[in-house]
């Protein structure tokens, strides 16, 4: 079923690289398609035109008798439209000039067949039907059997050139689908890996009922800082946390942005009904915070994790005034 509109051909072949003259010459050489074959095809043009209508009618009777191929036609008008395109396609076989433009058009048509969902077997079946039908009209035109066979072989070579070009388009289209699927899979895998790493990089652990600990290791950027806050607040809600120890011993640098985000996290914890204690500030980090003028009045800090856990235990074991925080 090689009939497609110009618009379909352009759309279907938009992503298929056109074949160049060198590649076309290699293919013709491999098929032993010569200038003599082109001359023989031109000699068959009268026969092809004379019997084109009859061959097309037989072909489409065959199409419409098959449930799978008949499904490509919505109505009688569509059948007639595609018949006309198919007739032009087959007539082109015996008009000469099998150049790069011819090859590129065959590639585009193959790409369109793939786009509309026409399986390769239906395309090859249509060509097989055409060869059988037109052969019955070619042979009687020649008194010499060898001459008839020479013309038939010329047509067969061109048909195989056509099929090779169309199959290239099918393969290229399917390779693009596979590449797109692989790229989507890579992106999905990378996204899942990043999410897993991010989750592991902000683990909120429950020491006992009401007491949570968040050990932070590595640098903190704005995106990770937001994730830390989200992880803490979610754990407070899900685990009914009342005290959270945020340990930043493993954080190499704390700039004003990170420090301010820690202050905001502490405030957010308070709004969720939990108290936050920040532990692990190094002398260098403490000096940096003082130099930056970060407001630490709302943040309780303890030197090390052990001291922070003790402070949290004390908080949970008895009443404390707001002044202590």
Image (tube, rainbow, N blue to C red):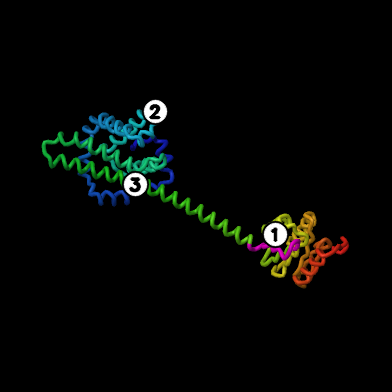
Residue 243, numbered circle: none
**Spot occupied by residue 26 in the image (x, y as percentages of width and height):** 29, 52
Mark 3 Cα-neighbour bin, 10 Å: few <14, some 14–19, many ≥20: many
**Spot occupied by residue 198 in the image (x, y as percentages of width and height):** 63, 60
Give me the residue at 36% from left, 29% from top.
79
Disc 3 to disc 2: CB gap under 8 Å: no
Foreground: disc 3 or disc 2: 2
Magenta residues (range): 200-211
Mark 1 Cα-neighbour bin, 10 Å: few <14, some 14–19, many ≥20: many
**Spot occupied by residue 39 in the image (x, y as percentages of width and height):** 21, 40
| Residue 309, magenta (yes or no) | no
Mark 2 secondary-structure assignment: loop
Q: What is the distance, in whole Å, between disc 2 and disc 1 at their CAs?
A: 62 Å
Where is 46 relative to 252, above or below?
Answer: above
- Residue 273 shown left or right of residue 1 in the figure: right
| Residue 206, magenta (yes or no) | yes
2 or 1: tag closer to the N-terminus: 2
Q: What is the distance, in whole Å, between disc 1 and disc 3 at their CAs?
A: 54 Å
Disc 1 to disc 3: CB gap under 8 Å: no
Nearer-the-camera pick, 183 or 101: 183
Give me the residue at 86% from left, 63% from top.
320
Q: Which residue is mark 1?
A: 228
Give me the residue at 27% from left, 38% from top.
93
- Residue 174 shown left or right of residue 144 in the figure: right
Where is 125 relative to 274, above or below?
Answer: above
3 or 2: tag closer to the N-terminus: 2
| Residue 201, picture quadrant | bottom right
**Spot occupied by residue 316 in the image (x, y as percentages of width and height):** 80, 63
Residue 222 visible? The answer is no
Q: Which residue is mark 2?
A: 75
Q: Which residue is mark 3?
A: 167
């Amino acid at each position: 079923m090689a009939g497609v509109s110009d618009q379909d051909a352009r759309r279907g072949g938009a992503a298929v690289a056109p074949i160049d003259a060198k590649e076309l010459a290699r293919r013709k050489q491999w098929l032993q398609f010569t200038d003599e074959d082109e001359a023989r095809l031109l000699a068959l043009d009268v026969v092809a035109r004379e019997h084109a209508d009859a061959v097309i009618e037989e072909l489409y009777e065959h199409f419409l008798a098959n449930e799978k191929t008949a499904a490509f036609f919505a109505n009688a008008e569509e059948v007639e439209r595609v018949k006309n395109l198919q007739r032009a396609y087959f007539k082109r076989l015996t008009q000469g000039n099998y150049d790069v433009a011819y090859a590129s058009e065959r590639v585009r048509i193959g790409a369109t067949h793939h786009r509309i969902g026409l399986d390769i077997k239906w395309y090859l079946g249509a060509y097989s039907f055409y060869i059988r039908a037109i052969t019955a009209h070619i042979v009687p035109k020649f008194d010499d059997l060898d001459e008839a066979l020479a013309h038939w072989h010329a047509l067969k070579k061109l048909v195989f050139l056509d099929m090779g070009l169309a199959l290239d388009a099918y393969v290229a289209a399917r390779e693009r689908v596979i590449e797109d699927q692989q790229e989507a899979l890579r992106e999905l895998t990378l996204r899942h890996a990043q999410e897993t790493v991010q989750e592991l990089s902000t683990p909120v652990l429950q020491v006992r009922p009401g007491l949570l600990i968040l050990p932070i290791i590595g640098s903190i950027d704005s995106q990770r800082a937001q994730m830390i806050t989200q992880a803490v607040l979610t754990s407070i809600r899900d685990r009914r946390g009342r005290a959270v120890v945020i340990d930043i011993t493993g954080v190499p640098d704390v700039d004003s942005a990170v420090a301010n985000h820690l202050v905001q996290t502490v405030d957010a914890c308070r709004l969720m009904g939990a108290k936050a204690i920040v532990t692990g500030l190094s002398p260098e980090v403490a000096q940096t915070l003082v130099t930056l003028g970060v407001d630490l009045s709302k943040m309780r800090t303890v030197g090390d994790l052990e001291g922070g856990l003790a402070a949290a235990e004390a908080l949970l074991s008895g009443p404390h005034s707001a002044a202590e925080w």
